Image (cartoon, grey):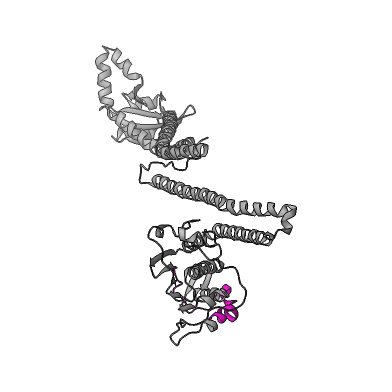
Amino acid sequence: MNLRSRLGVLSAVTAAASTLAVSAALLVADARAAVPRADASLVAAAAQSDQVARAVKSRSDGPDAAIALDKPLTVGDVTLELLPSAAAAADAGTSTIAGRLTAQDVEAVRGGQAVAPDWRTVDGARYRVHLTPFGASGGMVVAVWPASAGARAERELALRLGLLVVVAALIAGLLGRAVARRALAPVARLQATAEQITATGDLGRRIPVTEADEVGRLTATVNAMLASLEVSVTAQRQLVADASHELRTPLTVLRTNLDLLAEPPALDDPEAPELVAQARRQVTELTELVADLVSLARYGRTPQAPQDVRLDEVVASVVARQGDRTDRHPVVLDLAPTVVRGEPEALQRLVSNLVANAIAWSPPGAPVTVRLRDGRLDVEDAGPGIPDADLPHVFERFYRSPAARSKPGSGLGLAIVQQVAESHRGTAGVTSSPGGSTFTVELPTVDGQATAPASDASASDEDGTARAARDAVGSTPDGRAPGSGEAGSRQPGPRADERERA
């Protein structure tokens, strides 16, 4: 059973239950009002006895008129019997439609008073009986209402109400199904579009939003999901295409070098060591490329277990691990205590890529400046600057400007920077001039925790690499490292790629 049918059945059941409850209440109310209604009918019929008698006499001639009045008359459910002399009927023991009259009945009527309706049993049947005076000669009107008439009326009412319940349920079911069909038409369009996308793989299809209600918001949400999925799939396809292109060249060179080394005379060739060195460099580039691809996949999502991280200590730790690179390029640190919420390893990779990129593009001896204030990280190099044509593409995957193609690297370093920043609800940007470029990353800080204790990830380096970086770089009384300081310790650390300006 589909959703429309279920809604129709639900509407029918609801309508039937509601109508049934109302019908039951009506039956109870009608049963309670049956006796007062019967009494009112008895009194009204008895009050019409004079008119009834005249009408009977006018239709009968001569002595037949008296005979006609001796027969019971019916007015609706009430039966009337007209007695010319109530006393004579009582003395003679005449049986009326209400049974035998008692002396109390005769006395009450003779005094001009009516006997209030009450229940009497005649031949096993119950009747509501009302006695009232008739004429001026001591006559009596006997009005009776059978209890069977009330039961019959209740049965008829119950039958009508039962039919009403059935009709109401059918109408509600049909209307509910029709309304559900109209209301679920956008959902049907959603289903049809999803089926077409599944069949064709076309993620560019969108569903028109025609309403501003919940279904309209659902349609807009599905459209947004399709757009996000389309972007993700497009990026994935582009990544695969770019990765295959980047892997093809080093693999070809590596295969050629190995083929040459496999030939017997190659071992005695004086160029063999150079071929081996090239093969090793190609393997190193492949290893770095694979590591960058893994980083793109890993750091492109929202941190799974975020924690409070002292970003200033992460920067100091990364600089300390740059090794001999900081001997050729002094690093000037201007760091304020800053706490951000995120994944420590991802933030370390972000800082490492920015610092390595600045070192790679700065001339030997030129300082690299790293500033951190209120969640804003600026890494400034002293390089030649970035051409205006390349600025919009520096964070794209595998993009390498003409000047960067002569440098080692995969072209993924800055793409990783942007992904890490965005996954931490931040932004990454760049400004450039002929005298150098400044890469800026802005991350939301943890309010009120600018001087919080170091996080687990950065605290482990507090007594080691971070402190070594501070001691090696040195600092002025205002906390700014002098430009001539030698940043970095000699401790080995993870690879910090020289990122191409991409």
Say whether residue 426 is left or right of residue 54.
right
Q: Is residue 5 magenta?
A: no
Residue found farthest to the right: 264
Residue at the image point whose x is 68% and y is 62% from the top: 273
**Residue 236 sits above or below residue 369 on the image:** above
Q: Nearer the viewer, residue 151 or 401?
A: 401
Would you say residue 392 is visible in this rendering? yes
Picture mark count: 0
**Residue 283 sits above or below residue 165 on the image:** below
Q: Position of residue 382 (x, y in %)?
A: 43, 72
Q: Nearer the viewer, residue 201 or 131?
A: 201
Snapshot quadrant of residue 36: top left
From which residue to which does the magenta span run?
A: 443-469
Q: Nearer the viewer, residue 344 or 85?
A: 344
Would you say residue 502 is visible in this rendering? no
Residue at the image point whose x is 39% and y is 66% from the top: 432
Q: Position of residue 447 (x, y in %)?
A: 44, 73
Q: Is residue 452 magenta?
A: yes
Q: Position of residue 237 (x, y in %)?
A: 52, 48
Residue found farthest to the bottom: 477
Q: Nearer the viewer, residue 423 or 484?
A: 484
Residue at the image point whose x is 38% and y is 41% from the top: 208
Snapshot quadrant of residue 147: top left
**Residue 345 sits above or below residue 209 on the image:** below
Say whether residue 268 is left or right of residue 10.
right
**Residue 190 sits above or below residue 361 on the image:** above
Q: Position of residue 98 (x, y in %)?
A: 41, 28
